[in-house]
Image: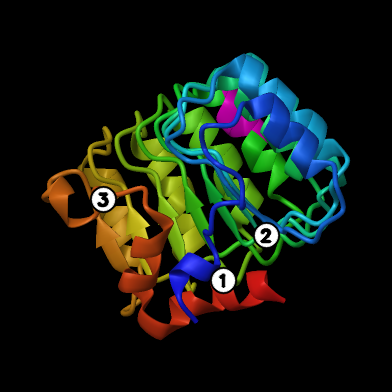
């Protein structure tokens, strides 16, 4: 299976307006993957797209990364996703949705057991947004990939995220780099990874974790876990590309894409 079959662009010219794409999405023609990354989509465009999503319950993967979507657009998209009962992947990285947008997304994914991957990197998300996302993923035991790098999340937010994933035995990659996590947050993360043999990558580079927090993490990590803390070269894992998760996990990473195909 080729990656392009998962992230294929809808058979519409990119030059068409978001309004026409929103109308296109309303037609029951069998498309289940929406890739509109890096298309300069703004809040108004996102609102138009959301109208189409609301009437299309087939979407499994939605990629709106690397656009210009703010809180208003994110709230609209979150509302539009409510009918996407099969959603397995949401890529929203490299926008500026803020806490308001993250709260809306957190509410939208709550009790959504099909979600396997969630990417929210570089979105100006603080503790309140992280708390909502943590609550949103709490009942999901299938989430495999969770990226929320390069935001403004401190201990309060990461503790909520940890509460959301503590019972998740499927999570393979957790990326929390370039945030404001200190020792209390590290202790909560250490509790999550203690005895966890499924997690393969934990990225905590460029946070504010002290020696005690790092010691707790190292004491809890399994032999198979690649743990990256703030003193390591960010080039190692400086990516928000979902395709790189496959490279990190090898053939195990294909599970997300295989399930999404079903």
- Identify the main secondary structure in magenta: helix
Residue at position x 20%, y 43% from top? 230
Which comes before the other along the chain, label 1 or label 2? 2
Residue of label 2: 88
Local crowd size for mark 3, using a 10 Å CA cut-off: few (<14), some (14–19), many (≥20): some
Mark 1, secondary structure of its residue: helix
Query: Horizontal placement of 46 versus 179: left or right?
Result: right
The C terminus sits in image quarter: bottom right
Of 79 and 54, which appears nearest the observer? 54
Q: Position of residue 86 (x, y in %)?
A: 79, 60
Mark 2, secondary structure of its residue: loop
Local crowd size for mark 2, using a 10 Å CA cut-off: few (<14), some (14–19), many (≥20): many
**Marking on residue 256:** 1
Residue of label 3: 214
Of 104 and 22, which appears nearest the observer? 22
- Distance (Cα) linking label 1 and label 3: 30 Å
């Amino acid at each position: 299976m080729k990656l392009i079959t998962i992230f294929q662009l809808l058979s519409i010219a990119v030059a068409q307006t978001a309004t026409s794409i929103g109308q296109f999405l309303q037609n029951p023609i069998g498309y289940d993957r929406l890739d509109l990354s890096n298309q300069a989509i703004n809040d108004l465009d996102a609102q138009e797209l959301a109208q189409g999503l609301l009437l299309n319950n087939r979407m499994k993967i939605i990629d709106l990364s690397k656009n210009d979507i703010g809180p208003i657009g994110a709230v609209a998209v979150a509302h539009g996703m409510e009918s996407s009962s099969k959603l397995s992947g949401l890529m929203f990285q490299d926008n500026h949705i803020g806490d308001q947008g993250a709260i809306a997304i957190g509410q939208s994914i709550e009790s959504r057991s099909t979600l396997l991957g969630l990417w929210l990197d570089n979105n100006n998300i603080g503790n309140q947004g992280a708390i909502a996302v943590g609550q949103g993923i709490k009942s999901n035991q299938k989430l495999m990939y969770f990226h929320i790098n390069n935001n403004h999340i401190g201990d309060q937010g990461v503790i909520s995220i940890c509460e959301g994933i503590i019972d998740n035995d499927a999570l393979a990659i957790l990326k929390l780099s370039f945030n404001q996590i200190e020792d209390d947050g590290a202790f909560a993360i250490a509790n999550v990874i203690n005895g966890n043999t499924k997690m393969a990558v934990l990225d905590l580079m460029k946070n504010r974790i002290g020696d005690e927090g790092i010691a707790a993490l190292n004491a809890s990590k399994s032999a198979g876990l690649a743990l990256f803390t703030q003193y390591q070269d960010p080039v190692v894992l400086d990516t928000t590309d979902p395709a790189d998760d496959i490279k990190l996990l090898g053939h195990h990473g294909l599970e997300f894409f295989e399930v999404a195909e079903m």
